[in-house]
Image (cartoon, grey):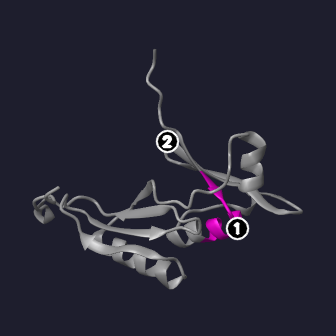
Amino acid sequence: MTTPVLSQIDLICADVSKTIAFYRVLGLKFPKSAIWTTKTGSHHVRIEMGSMEMALDSIPLAKAYNESFRGLPGGGNIVIGFSVATRRAVDATYAKLVRAGHKGLQPPFDAFWGSRYAIVADPDGNHVGLMSPVDAKKRSAGPSL
């Protein structure tokens, strides 16, 4: 038996257009030609991100392909992590998203593992982590759990 490979993050969105706008502020590229829209609104978009892909689906679409879908749980049980190039980029990206009206959940800080790290909520409450590369000089003892 082969080991499954994680290949896609698929977010169900209350409003696909608002979620696209959030991730565009973050810097992701969603070509208009890739967004499936009907007279009732935007329902699906998929972009490739290296060896992964990210998809955004509307609630009506999720109900059409998943009969067990019962609505949005409100996010917060997963962190969708994005790498940024520098420690300063964590601060700048966090500030840009908060200025655009998105809720900051964890302001940027120097994490014990050596990265600069922050978390912002997307429009559906999903936690979006922003992390710089690790700097071994910035490592510290982990929390006492």
Between 124 and 52, the one nearer to me in the picture = 124
Residue 77 found in image quarter: bottom left
Query: In the rendered image, is residue 15 in sight?
Result: yes
As displayed, is residue 133 above or below residue 18? above
Residue at 24% across / 63% down in the picture?
Answer: 115
Q: Say if mark 1 contacts mark 2, CB within 8 Å.
A: no
Residue 18 counted in the magenta span: yes
Residue that badge 1 annotates: 17
At x 49%, y 85%, the residue is: 99
Residue 119 screen position, x and y as percent: 39, 68
Taking 80 as reference, is 40 left or right?
Answer: right
Q: Nearer the viewer, mark 1 or mark 2?
A: 1
Q: Secondary structure at mark 2?
A: loop
| Residue located at (58% from left, 70% from top) | 22
Instruction: Name the residue at the top extreme.
Output: 1
- In percent of width and height, residue 143 lies at 16, 60
Percent x, y for residue 33? 76, 58
Number of marks in picture: 2
Say which element carries label 1.
Answer: helix
Q: Is residue 19 above or below residue 103?
A: above
Residue 84 appearing in the image: no
User: What kind of residue is marked 1?
Assistant: Ser
Q: Residues within 10 Å of mark 1 (few under 14, many from 20)?
A: some
Q: Which residue is mark 2?
A: 51
- Looking at the rendering, the stretch of residues picked out in magenta corresponds to 11-21
Q: Residues within 10 Å of mark 2 (few under 14, many from 20)?
A: few
Q: Is residue 140 magenta?
A: no
| Circle 2: residue type | Ser
Side of 62 relative to 37 (left or right): left
When asked about the image quadrant of residue 43, the answer is bottom right
93 sits to left or right of 41: left
